[in-house]
Amino acid sequence: SIKDKIAFLTQNNAPQTQGTIVYGRAGMDYFADNRNTFSLTGNLVRGKFRNRDYLYTSRDTTYPTFTSHETSERDLRSITYFTNSGFVTGYRHNFSRPNRDITADVTYNQTNNTNTSDYQSYYFDMAGIALPPVGAERATGGGKTKFLTIQSDYATPFSKNKRLETGLRMSRRNFISYNDNFIQDLTSRRYVYIPAIAVAYNFNDQVYAAYANYAQQFKTFSLQAGLRVENSRYDGRLVSGKSFSNSYPFSLFPSLYLSKKLSEHQNLQLNYSRKINRPGFFQIIPFIDFSDSLNLTIGFPGLKPEFIHLGELSYVYQNLQGNTFQGTIYGKRSDDIILRYQYRAANPNPAKLDSVIFNSYANARESNTMGIELTNRTKVMNWWDLTTSFNLYHIDVNADNLAGAGNTTLTSYFGKIASTFRLGNNFTLQLNSEYQAKTILPVNAGRNATTASYGGSIFGSSQVSAQGYIKPLFSTDISLKKEFGKNNAAALTLQFNDVLRTRLYSTHANGSYFSQDYSRRRDPQYARLNFNYRFGKPDGSIFKRRNQRADMEPVQGIPQ
């Protein structure tokens, strides 16, 4: 029977991208008097990218009595244009009491993009004989994004060792996007619009929040406690009339940081925080990417934010020679964790009757991570600094709410070694190596949440599939820097990444109907030469604004 047969699908490609980005930024501060400052910063970005990809595919088709085999070649050429412009305007008032101030900032950004992709496919039978030609395919798309943020912060010290910070923040984003698909008529050579797989989408994202942080320093003990309250909502609508929404009228994000000085060189720290990871733009937008006709990519508009509880207990030792050791035990729980998810469904192209694999995103029930991280920085010699880090963690992912997925448990580890050598004559050599063992989630996701409160990252965070794991990864980078000129104001740095050519990102996924291995090597072995020169003592504060807190961070000026 067909279900007893195995069909193999093999794909190879080596995409190349050429692009140009022009970026400009200018800012100014106006000091109205010694207590009032007005600031204005503007930026403009323009870009153009051309992509060329040749995809080779070999696949089987199973029948009750035999299995057929065919190959295909797909030539993809695409071009993308984008512009981004925006400004930040701010006001700051310093009160007569030291370290008391109030700020207000307005940030606005607008992005426009258009893209065109052309695909030409060629098919061959089992004997390698070309099959009848098919029409070329074309996809055109674009969109506009508007992002407005208004924030005000107030900071006041009650005494030398007590400080309070409060703030209000509002952010609103609006996305308008479209994607049209065409197929070429072989007779007229004209492109025919396919309305069945066209998508136009509009969504709005809004977050209103308030926070308060209190910090106090005692003789050998310090604390910082904070609470953020927010109201958030997401609304999306297809031009066809179908709509999606997520609403969180009232969400609380407490945080607590405690630090105890055990001796002159030792500290004990205990931290807790609740965080949020919002789905990014490309994770929720329901456009179908047809660049690989057998593995279509589509966002999931119903994706919900991921809520995270994170706790850490750390011991820190530092001596006068600059040697530092830190040991941390941590735990993390994520509800509605966002993962990549693959499923099989009918081909959305009405002209084709086969099924395809969709690559999308979904919310699994939860994940739990427990781990220990050890980091040591040693001054081996006056000319050699060595930093080593080891992270051992255990992950449980519950994804039994997703068809074809389930519960997964795995213990993994991550290690990193960084060496800095001062060679004399102002030469510095850096050598960095890291190894990630087989894992369900990479170490950064296992330990640190990708937080995106107040609206989140447009692109979101990449996660491993709910149906598989990430294969081991090892890489080594090296760089050499030479400083010269008066006061070493000039520096020339030569960087070479992945010197052993081992940085291959690979994943394995499997479900009730498929088993898939995927590998990608991005930017293989490149060298980069950078030249820097410092003119005087530049003040970069003109481009810096108060941290728009997604989570509470230790208050500046209060010892931790």
Image (spheres, helix red, strand yellow):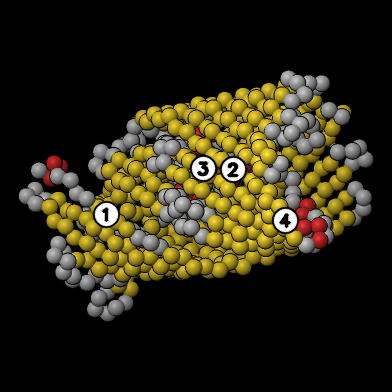
Q: Is 97 positioned to the left or the right of 173 in the image? A: right
The span from disc 4 to disc 2 (Cα, nearest Å) is 22 Å
Which residue ends up furthest to the left in the rendered image?
65
Q: Residues within 10 Å of mark 4 (few under 14, many from 20)?
A: few
* Mark 2 nearby-residue class (10 Å; few <14, some 14–19, many ≥20): some
Q: Which mark, by number, is residue 10?
A: 1
Q: Amino acid at mark 3?
A: Glu
The residue sitting at 62% across, 24% down in the picture is 313
Tell me what residue is drawn at x 24 percent, y 78 percent.
187
Contact? badges 3 and 4 (CB < 8 Å): no
- Quadrant of the image containing the C terminus: top right
Which residue is under mark 4? 425
Q: Which tag is nearer the camera, tag 1 or tag 3?
A: 3
User: For mark 2, what is the residue?
Assistant: 418
Return the disc, 4 or 2, that comes first in the chain's sequence: 2
Name above or below for residue 425 compared with residue 265. Answer: below
Which label lies toward us, 1 or 2?
Answer: 2
Residue 434 marker: 3
Q: Viewer-nearest of labels 3 and 4? A: 4
Say what secondary structure mark 3 lies in: strand
Camera-side residue: 543 or 503? 503
Between discs 3 and 2, the one toward the N terminus = 2
Kind of residue at badge 4: Asn
**Residue occupying the point 37% across, 69% down:** 118
Q: CA distance from mark 3 to mark 4?
A: 29 Å
Where's residue 32, x and y in %? Answer: 90, 55
